[in-house]
């Protein structure tokens, strides 16, 4: 095998196109070709590309102050954490540079909570098959996906995995003496775009309450307005003890956070955690501008309207392609088409027709457009997917 003409660690296998510019829902290549972006950097570019308010916030801050260190007060952190807490169950926030780091924070909060309460033996974190929590050792062990943990040494102690949407499988894993927390994505992204049922998410809350354990939500992908509510768990009528966010909250700038009630975070005192870049002034400027847009009730109402439209359109696609499309999954503008075949050829057929979509586990084609999409973009995406599915169908018949 010959080596590729560059020096990037080959852990990804991207297509040939090189995108050099973005505007709204559109991406343009170095040869000037325009693509409709229905994956948005995997649910990151929530406000589309080059949103004027984000560009303005970043460039204004870039001329003032880039970095301080958390050894000093960062004004932007105090403002943005206020906004996160006013808009949620949370009372304290720690800013990170990524979703993975936010997950690490949740895991540390959970174990420290019990050790601070005199029960350091309570270390078990119950996660779910099909979950994704990032690529650190904590993240891969919390999710337990064999493709991501194999070859990286022995599994870390204290991580267990139940079936998503199956409360009995969770109960079967609980040892009251060592049970620390449950970690769940209210809507699984990577694992196949599966929404938790109301009964399941509420049942997890009850199990945690009954055992004095913490309920941890990973809203890295499904939060930040993606489902049509600011935070996905608002659909379920329960709140977690702590939550991780990232992706959409930065709109493309590396930003994440973990947040918690003061009680859940009782062990996180001076010296127990830190970050050099987390919450740096550039990230805070973009994060605040993004939050002001994403949390606007009119904006969220529009996301819900577009989500309904997309959902109905995808159901139509399923009706037209019953052999290929088995199910429409997900919530809001995080949607999956469960296919009867591997999703990558259909993703490639869509890309050949200038539409960018993602894939997820369990043979799912993943759609996560910028939250600013309108009906015309949805119509174009559906037409293109229709053509791509026809092409795959014709190929299979040939
Ligand atoms: C993307 C993702 C992560 C990891 O975030 P990074 O920013 O890639 O570190 C964690 N959890 C979920 C649900 C995600 O979708």
Image (cartoon, helix red, strand yellow):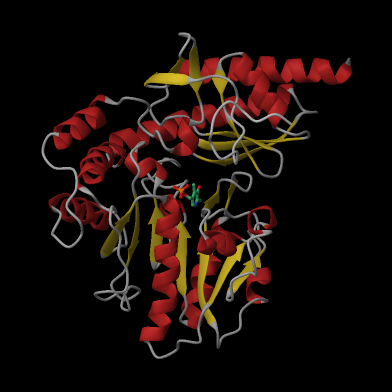
* Front one among 95 and 311: 95
Return the residue found at the far top.
Answer: 32
Q: Quadrant of residue 173?
A: bottom right
Q: Position of residue 40 (x, y in %)?
A: 46, 31
Number of numbered discs overlaid on the protein picture: 0
Q: Quadrant of residue 90?
A: bottom left
Return the residue found at the far right.
Answer: 398
Query: Residue 149, relative to residue 302: is it above or below?
Result: below
Q: Quadrant of residue 372?
A: top left
Quadrant showing the N terminus: top right
Query: Residue 192, relative to residue 74: is it above or below?
Result: above
Res. 14 in view: yes
In the rendered structure, the answer to whether residue 106 lies left or right of residue 54 reads: right
Return the residue found at the far left.
Answer: 64
* Front one among 351 and 137: 137
Res. 385 in view: no
In the rendered structure, the answer to whether residue 209 lies left or right of residue 96 reads: right
Identify the residue shown where x is 25% and y is 32%: 54
Q: Position of residue 122 (x, y in %)?
A: 50, 83
Q: Position of residue 177 (x, y in %)?
A: 55, 88
Query: Residue 104, relative to residue 398: is it above or below?
Result: below
Identify the residue shown where x is 14% and y is 32%: 60
Quadrant showing the C terminus: top right
Q: Position of residue 161 (x, y in %)?
A: 64, 67
Identify the residue shown where x is 27% and y is 43%: 287
* Front one among 267 and 85: 267
Identify the residue shown where x is 59% and y is 71%: 156
Query: Residue 297, relative to residue 239: is it above or below?
Result: above
In the rendered structure, the answer to whether residue 36 lies left or right of residue 47 reads: right
């Amino acid at each position: 095998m010959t080596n590729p003409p560059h020096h990037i660690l080959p852990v990804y296998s991207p297509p040939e196109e090189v995108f050099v510019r973005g505007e709204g829902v559109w991406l343009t290549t170095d040869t000037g070709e325009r693509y409709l972006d229905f994956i948005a950097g995997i649910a990151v570019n929530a406000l589309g590309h080059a949103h004027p308010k984000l560009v303005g916030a970043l460039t204004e801050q870039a001329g003032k102050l880039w970095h301080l260190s958390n050894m000093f007060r960062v004004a932007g952190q105090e403002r943005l954490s206020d906004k996160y807490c006013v808009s949620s169950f949370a009372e304290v926030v720690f800013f990170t540079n990524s979703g993975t780091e936010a997950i690490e924070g949740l895991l540390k909060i959970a174990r420290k909570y019990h050790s601070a309460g005199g029960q350091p033996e309570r270390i078990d974190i119950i996660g779910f098959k099909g979950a994704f929590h990032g690529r650190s050792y904590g993240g891969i062990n919390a999710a337990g996906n064999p493709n991501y943990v194999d070859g990286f040494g022995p599994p870390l102690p204290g991580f267990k995995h139940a079936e998503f949407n199956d409360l009995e499988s969770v109960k079967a894993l609980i040892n009251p003496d060592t049970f620390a927390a449950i970690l769940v994505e209210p809507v699984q992204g990577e694992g196949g775009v599966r929404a938790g049922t109301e009964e399941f998410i509420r049942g997890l809350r009850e199990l945690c309450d009954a055992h004095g354990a913490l309920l941890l939500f990973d809203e890295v992908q499904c939060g930040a307005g993606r489902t049509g509510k600011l935070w996905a768990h608002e659909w379920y009528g329960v709140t977690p003890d702590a939550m991780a966010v990232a992706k959409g909250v930065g709109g493309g700038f590396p930003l994440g956070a973990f947040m918690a009630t003061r009680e859940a975070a009782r062990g996180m005192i001076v010296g127990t955690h830190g970050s050099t870049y987390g919450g740096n002034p550039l990230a805070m400027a973009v994060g605040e501008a993004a939050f002001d847009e994403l949390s606007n009730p009119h904006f969220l109402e529009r996301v819900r309207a577009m989500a309904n439209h997309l959902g109905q359109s995808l159901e139509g696609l399923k009706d037209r392609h019953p052999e290929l499309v088995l199910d429409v999954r997900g919530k809001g503008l995080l949607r999956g088409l469960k296919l009867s075949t591997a999703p990558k050829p259909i993703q490639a057929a869509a890309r050949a027709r200038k539409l960018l979509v993602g894939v997820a586990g369990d043979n799912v084609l993943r759609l996560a457009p910028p939250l600013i999409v309108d009906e015309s973009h949805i119509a174009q995406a559906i037409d293109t997917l229709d053509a791509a599915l026809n092409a795959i169908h014709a190929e299979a018949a040939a």
